[in-house]
Image (cartoon, grey):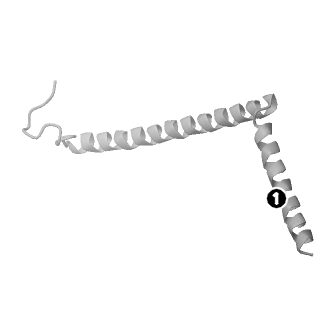
Amino acid sequence: MRRLLWLGIGLAVGALVVRAVAKKAQAFTPQGIAASARDSAAGFAANVRNFVDDVRDGMAEREAEIHTAFAEGLTLDEDLYPEGRQHG
């Protein structure tokens, strides 16, 4: 009975190993490489899209700050010119 138990465990572990090796081997086939490249390109495109959206949000926020300061006659970025000197 013990031998049968160990045989079952060995078969189960063997099946898992064969499945894992087959899955890894699939990644190195032309279809697997193409799928990986496609996923990488899609992920890269999504990251670029998110970056562009973040930059646009930052630009809109800064533009609102500039419009508000201009309308109120305030000086922007006083921390850049603490002595009161103006650039330009």
Residue at 25 percent of width and 39 percent of height: 70
Is 40 or 78 nearer to us in this picture?
40
Q: Write the residue at 38% across / 44% down.
A: 61
- Residue 75 falls left or right of residue 50: left
Element at label 1? helix
Please identify the residue farthest to the left as the structure is shown.
83
- 70 to 30, vertically: above or below: below
Is 46 located above or below residue 6 in the figure? above
- So how many labels did they put on this image? 1
Looking at the image, which residue sits at the far bottom?
1
The residue to which callout 1 is attached is 13
Question: Dot 1 surroundings within 10 Å: few (below 14), some, or many (20 or more)?
Answer: few
Q: Residue furthest top?
A: 88
Image coords of residue 72 (percent x, y): 23, 45
Q: Amino acid at mark 1?
A: Val
Front-lying residue, 25 or 77:
25
Specify the quadrant of the image occupied by residue 13: bottom right
Quadrant in which the N terminus appears: bottom right
Q: Position of residue 44 (x, y in %)?
A: 60, 35
Residue at x 79% of width, y 38% of height: 25
Please state, as top left, top right, bottom left or bottom right, where the C terminus lies in the image.
top left
Q: Position of residue 8 (x, y in %)?
A: 89, 65
Q: Quadrant of residue 40?
A: top right
At 36% from the left and 39% from the top, the residue drawn is: 63
In the image, 67: left or right of 14? left
In this view of the protein, which residue sits in the foreground, 72 or 46?
Answer: 46
Say left or right for 35 vs 6. left
Image spot of residue 55 (x, y percent): 45, 38
